[in-house]
Image (cartoon, grey):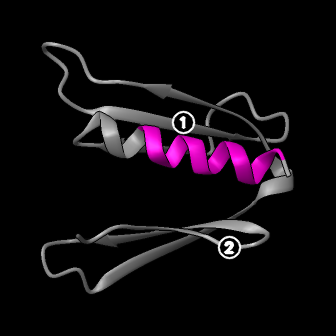
């Protein structure tokens, strides 16, 4: 597993390993208080990836779009995100 999602007390941290070797790493920190909404799209017959989109404050476009290979993973992450944002 190359990418990582970390739930802390106050923020969501997204770690994205990039490139073939994974030497380049991107870190994104999203405070829960700034997350205004998020959506979950589960996989279908032809589209096998599930997707989670996160919007910050009054942004028109999602601040982050995450793709998952299995629906089960995106549902668990969505539940954890909902609990963290609603606290």
Name the residue located 41 percent from the left edge and 41 percent from the top edge. 74
Q: Dividing the image into 4 quarters, which one contains the N terminus?
A: bottom left
Q: Residues within 10 Å of mark 1 (few under 14, many from 20)?
A: some
The residue drawn where x is 17% and y is 27% is 48
Residue 59: name its quadrant: top right
Badge 2 vs badge 1, beta-carbon distance below 8 Å: no
Please count the marks in the image: 2
Q: Farthest top residue?
A: 45
- Mark toward the start of the polypeptide (2 vs 1): 2
Assess whether residue 53 is covered by the magenta stretch: no
- Residue 61: x %, y % from top left: 64, 31
Which residue has dot 2 on it? 8
Residue 53: give its label: 1
Find the distance from the CA under tag 2 to the CA under tag 1. Answer: 19 Å
- 72 or 46: which is nearer to us? 72
Q: Secondary structure at mark 2?
A: loop
In the displayed structure image, the side of residue 58 where residue 49 appears, left or right: left
Mark 2 or 1: in front is: 2
- The stretch drawn in magenta includes residue 85: yes
Q: Which residues are magenta?
A: 75-86
**SS under mark 1:** strand
Residue 73 picture location, percent across and down: 35, 46
Up-down relation of residue 87 to residue 45 (above or below): below
Q: Nearer the viewer, residue 79 or 50?
A: 79
Does residue 21 appear left or right of residue 79 in this picture?
Answer: left
Q: Position of residue 56 (x, y in %)?
A: 75, 44
Numbered tag placed on residue 14 in the rendering: none
Is residue 23 depicted above or below 48 in this figure?
Answer: below
Q: Position of residue 7 (x, y in %)?
A: 61, 67
Question: Which is the main secondary structure of the residues drawn in magenta?
Answer: helix
């Amino acid at each position: 597993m190359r990418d990582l999602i970390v739930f802390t007390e106050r923020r969501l941290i997204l770690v994205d390993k990039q490139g073939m070797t994974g030497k380049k790493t991107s870190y994104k920190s999203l405070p829960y208080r700034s997350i205004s909404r998020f959506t979950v799209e589960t996989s279908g017959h032809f589209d096998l990836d599930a997707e989670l989109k996160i919007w910050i404050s009054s942004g028109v476009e999602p601040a982050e779009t995450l793709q998952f290979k299995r629906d089960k993973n995106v549902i668990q992450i969505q539940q954890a995100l909902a609990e963290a944002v609603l606290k």
